[in-house]
Amino acid sequence: MSSNETVPKAAKASNGEMRADEEADIAASTPEIDVTFFGHGWFLGLGSHAALLINSTGTSYTITSSPTSSPTPPFSSTPFTSNTQTFPTPLLHLPRRHRPLLHHQTLQDHRQDLRPNGLQLCESYSGIAVYDSPLSSSKPPHHPPTQNFLNLDTTQIGSDLYKHRVAAATNEISSGFYTKVICSRAVPLPSPTIDLLSTLYHGRLHNTPARTFTLSHSGTAATGFSPELVVGVENGKITTEPLAGTRSALGTASEIEARKRDLLSDTKEIAEHAISVLHAMAELRSDGLCVPSEVVVEDFMSVRPRGAVQHLGSRVVGRSIGEGKDAWDAFDALFPAITASGVPKRESLEAIQRLEGGGRARELYSGAVLLLEAAGESGESGGKGSEFFEATLVLRIVFQDEKRAWVQAGAGVIKESKPERELEETREKLASVVPWLVVRDPAEEKAFI
C-alpha cells in the first residue's frame, strides 16, 4: 500500500493485520443472519436491526419493520446524532440517472471491531452470539482444498460483444456526446454456488485492495477486493482517490516494472487519469462543498498495486468542508464515482444504459458500500468525538444469489481507446478475482447467500 493512501481508523490503531480466516470463521458459524465484513480494520456486522429499500426511480421506499410504500420525503442532510453502536451499511447500485439513489441500507444489530488479537466487542442488541475472545489461529476446517477452485477461463466470454460496445462508445465520444465512459462486461459463472467466504480467504491473500468486504443480505451475497475509495470524510476533511490507468501486475519482477514504465508514459492512460482528477477536484468545489482554495491534490499519478493489476492513482482532498455541509453532501457530489461512470456523469450514465444492454441495471457493480460512525461513538478505532464516513467502490467482486453467480469488470473508454486493449484490461482486472473463486462443497448444509 502507498503511504499516501487512506486507511480506515481501525487499521491505523491496530498496527497489525486481521487474519482472513478469522472473519470467515465467524460468518460460517452464523449463516442464518445478515453479515457484513469491511476491512482493513475488519468491522463485522451481524444481523439486521432495520432496513430501508428505495425503488429504482426514487419515488417510494419500504422499511422492513413497517413494510409500507410511501412517497419519498425530500432529501436532506442530517448530522450524525446516534451514539449507539449500530453499523449502517448502505448498499448502492449505480444509478440510472445522475442523482444517487439508496438501494438498500441495513442497520446491523451487532458490530464488532476485529483486531489481530481477537475481537473488541462494541454493543449488542437482540440475542445474537457474542464473540469476545481471541479466535483460533488454526486454519478453518471449512476452507476447501485447491482442487475446489473454479478454474474458469474468462478471456473469450463475451469478448466480441464487448469490443463492439467499446467501438460504439468511441464513436459517440468522437461525435461529442461525452468525454469518457466506463464500459463493463459481466461474466456468468457456471457454478451458482460459489463459496464466498473461502473466496474471501484466498482472494485476500493474493490481493492488495484499498478495502475488502463480504456481505450477505436478503438472498444476495458478494465478496469484493475494492481497489478504490469513492469518498472518505473524517472530522471535516474529505478525501477521494480516483484510479484510472491500468496494466497487468503478473509475471516476473522485470516484466511488471516494464509495464509500470509503460503505464507512466502511455498518453491515453495519462489523459484518462487526468480527466478523472480534474473532475474530482471540480466536484469537491461544487455547490459550496469545500472552499476552492482548500481543494488540493496530495498525491498525483502514483502507481498503486492492486492484486493482478497496477493502476495510476491520485489522492484529492478538500481540507475543510464548507459551512452547513456534511458527509452526505460530499457523497452526493462524488457518487457515482467518475472512474466507474464517466464524464460528464449524466451523459455517461445514459450511455451505460444503452451500451450495456437496453437499460439493464448493473446492480451493485460500480455502486458503493458505506461505513458510517457517528460523532461521539467510542472505541479504539477512533476515539470519542470523531465522525467517520466512508464509501468504497464496488469493483473486483463476485456476486451470487439463489439462482446465479457472476463476476464483472470494466475499462475507461476515451476517444483514443482501442477495443482490443480495453478488452484486455477487463481480463487483467478479472484476474484479481477469478483465480480465487472457490466452488462450495455440495455436501455443506448451508451456504453464505
Image: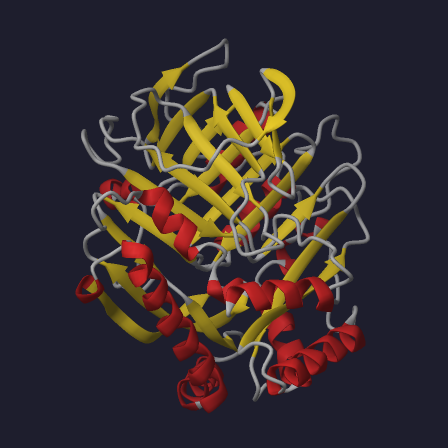
Identity of the residue drawn at 50% across and 14% down:
128
- In depth, the one of 143 and 351 nearer the eye is 351
Place of residue 89 in the rendered image (x, y in percent of width and height, measured from the top left): 48, 35
Location of residue 377 with respect to 418 vertically, above or below: above
Location of residue 216 with respect to 269 vertically, above or below: above
Left or right: 233 in relation to 331: left
* Residue 431 seen in this snapshot: no
Identity of the residue drawn at 78% across and 61% down:
358
Place of residue 381 in the rendered image (x, y in percent of width and height, measured from the top left): 26, 35
Rendered image quadrant of residue 121 = top left
Identity of the residue drawn at 58% across and 53% down:
94
Rendered image quadrant of residue 447 = top right
Place of residue 299 in the rendered image (x, y in percent of width and height, measured from the top left): 26, 70
Left or right: 149 in relation to 127: right
Total marks placed? 0
Coloured how?
Answer: secondary structure
Looking at the rendered image, the quarter that the N terminus falls into is bottom left
Identity of the residue drawn at 62% across and 37% down:
59
Location of residue 334 with respect to 251 vertically, above or below: above
* Residue 11 seen in this snapshot: yes
Residue placed furthest toward the top: 127
